[in-house]
Image (spheres, rainbow, N blue to C red):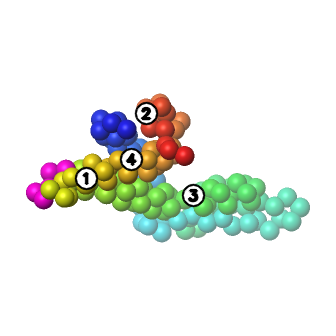
Amino acid sequence: MKDDQIAGLVAFLRARLTEDEQTASYDPDGRDPHPADLVWTYEPDGDEEFPGGNVVARGHYIVQDQPQAIGAHIARHDPARVLRDIQASRGVLSIYDQMTADLNAPDFLTRGMAPVAITVLAPVLCHLARAWSDHPDYQAEAWKPIA
């Protein structure tokens, strides 16, 4: 993968992560949400014939009357988890940032190894981008992960 393709991929990832962070952090009242407000749980309704339940955050119904499989899935992917996923992905991007900074390192060994390290990291970035493969800016051919 060429340097400009990697840079485009990184820019794409940063933009998607920012969008996801804004969505996960949304508060209809315009306040910064309390971290506990972002944790969702699934509470079964106890109906044995037609089992279902509600997705709840701090006593407020987020989604009501959902079959268990759907409600549990929604709760599992709550905003708090999305924000942790974003933090993890940004951690990978910070490794890329360090590697690109190493391209200008004063010592020969660090500077020489930086392109190799970036080449090794590129497939990881491609795999991260697959989460947004349905996005119109996703470049399927250029960012196709290895294996």
Q: Earlier in the sequence, mark 3 or mark 1?
A: 3
Q: What residue is disc 3 on?
A: 77
Type of the residue with mark 1:
Ala
Q: What residue is disc 4 on?
A: 122
C-alpha distance separating marks 4 and 3: 27 Å
Q: What residue is disc 1 on?
A: 114
C-alpha distance separating marks 3 and 1: 36 Å
Q: Does any portion of residue 16 appear in the rendered image?
A: yes
Type of the residue with mark 3:
His
Q: Residue furthest left?
A: 106
C-alpha distance separating marks 1 and 2: 21 Å
- Is the residue 77 above or below the residue 131 in the image? below
| Mark 3 crowdedness (10 Å alpha carbons): few <14, some 14-19, many ≥20 | some
Relative to the observer, which residue lies in front, 73 or 105?
105
Q: What residue is disc 2 on?
A: 142
> What stretch of residues is rendered in magenta?
103-107
Q: Secondary structure at mark 4?
A: helix
- Is the residue 13 above or below the residue 42 in the image? above
* Residue 40 x, y percent position in the rendering: 57, 63
Q: Earlier in the sequence, mark 1 or mark 2?
A: 1
Q: Does any portion of residue 29 appear in the rendered image?
A: no
Q: Residue at x 69, y 67 (%)?
A: 43
Contact check, label 2 and label 3, Cβ < 8 Å: no
